Amino acid sequence: MNGLLTLLGIESWKPIAGALLLPPVPLLLLVLIGARLILPRRGLGWFVVIVSVIGLWLGSCVGTAQLLTTVALKPPKPLSLSDIAELKDEARARKPVAIVVLGGGAEALAPEYGVANLKPWSLERLRYGVWLNRETGIPMAMSGGVGWGALPDSQTEAQIGARIASQEFGRPLKWIEDTSRDTRENALRTVALLRADQINHIVLVTHGTHMPRAVKLFEAAAGGNIRIQPAPMGLAKSNRAPWLDWVPSSQGFLQVNAVLHEFAASITGA
């Protein structure tokens, strides 16, 4: 799919396509279609309206997001204590290994800080990468430029992340990849950057829902010469009463949308 978009010169349309094809836009259109059908075909019209409302309800539930994540994405398990211990041993032995944090969006200007800032998903990933860096001693990289939907003169995710990692966490980045615009370019350009330093083991940090696609793209970019070890985060279960997970909420809507985005991107190769 990326190849087709590149061939047609419309890669920058990806954010628009995502906004139009993912909920709630298709379901809202179905409601309007169903309402129009009520006049000439009352039964069919009401059926379409009811299906659309059910879709909107389920599409805004945390429970739906968790179910879809398990069934459709199958994210890998988080790093275990033994995994952390092995990484510490690699760092002590000075083996060529790197922690790579993938960007997840940035704010052009956060008024409360007076500078550009990372969006919550990016900041969560960076925090976990910093924690791994502190626990293991493995040097850290961040990959992220200006996404397709951002203004072209925006500061890159990796540049913002480097400032936050150094100034706020006291853990400077060793590598910065700031020219990529999506996960596919994250993989291609980060692998090339680290390969120049003979890195043969990447500990990849991103959200669990994003991890299956990210690992697949990084492994393809590495060509079997670099080990890609997933270090997923953001997979904590809800601590609310179970029935509340099936009540629509803004949190549920965002989570379902993220899962469907990843699923759609995986099956299309985007």
Image (cartoon, rainbow, N blue to C red):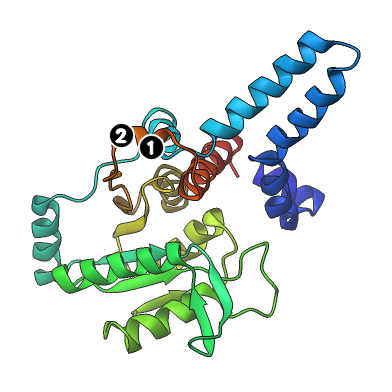
**Disc 2 crowd, CA 10 A, few/some/many (<14, 14-19, 20+):** few
The foreground one among 185 and 254 is 254
The residue beneath circle 2 is 242
- 84 vs 4, left or right, is left
Between 23 and 70, the residue placed more toward the observer is 23
- Rendered residue at 82%/11% (across/down): 42
SS for dot 1:
helix
> Does the residue at mark 1 contact the one at mark 2 (Cβ under 8 Å)?
yes
- Mark yes or no: residue 139 visible: yes
Q: Amino acid at mark 1?
A: Asp
- Looking at the rendered image, the quarter that the N terminus falls into is top right
Image spot of residue 139 (x, y percent): 26, 74
Residue 18 vertical placement versus 127 (above, below): above
Q: Quadrant of residue 49?
A: top right
Q: Position of residue 262 (x, y in %)?
A: 51, 42
* 69 to the left or right of 92: right
For image coordinates 53% across by 66% down, the residue present is 105
Give me the disc on residue 176: none
* Residue beneath the point at 47% across and 75% down: 158
Q: Residue at x 48, y 88 (%)?
A: 113
Q: Residues within 10 Å of mark 1 (few under 14, many from 20)?
A: many
Name the residue that disc number 1 marks.
245
Residue 196 appears in the picture as rendered: no
Residue in front for this viewpoint, 164 or 102 = 164
Residue 249 drawn at (x, y percent):
49, 45
Kind of element beneath mark 2: helix
Q: How many numbered marks does the figure carry?
A: 2
When the figure is inspected, residue 103 is found, relative to residue 241, above or below; the finding is below
Q: Position of residue 155 (x, y in %)?
A: 58, 80
Report the Cα–Cα distance between label 1 and label 2.
6 Å
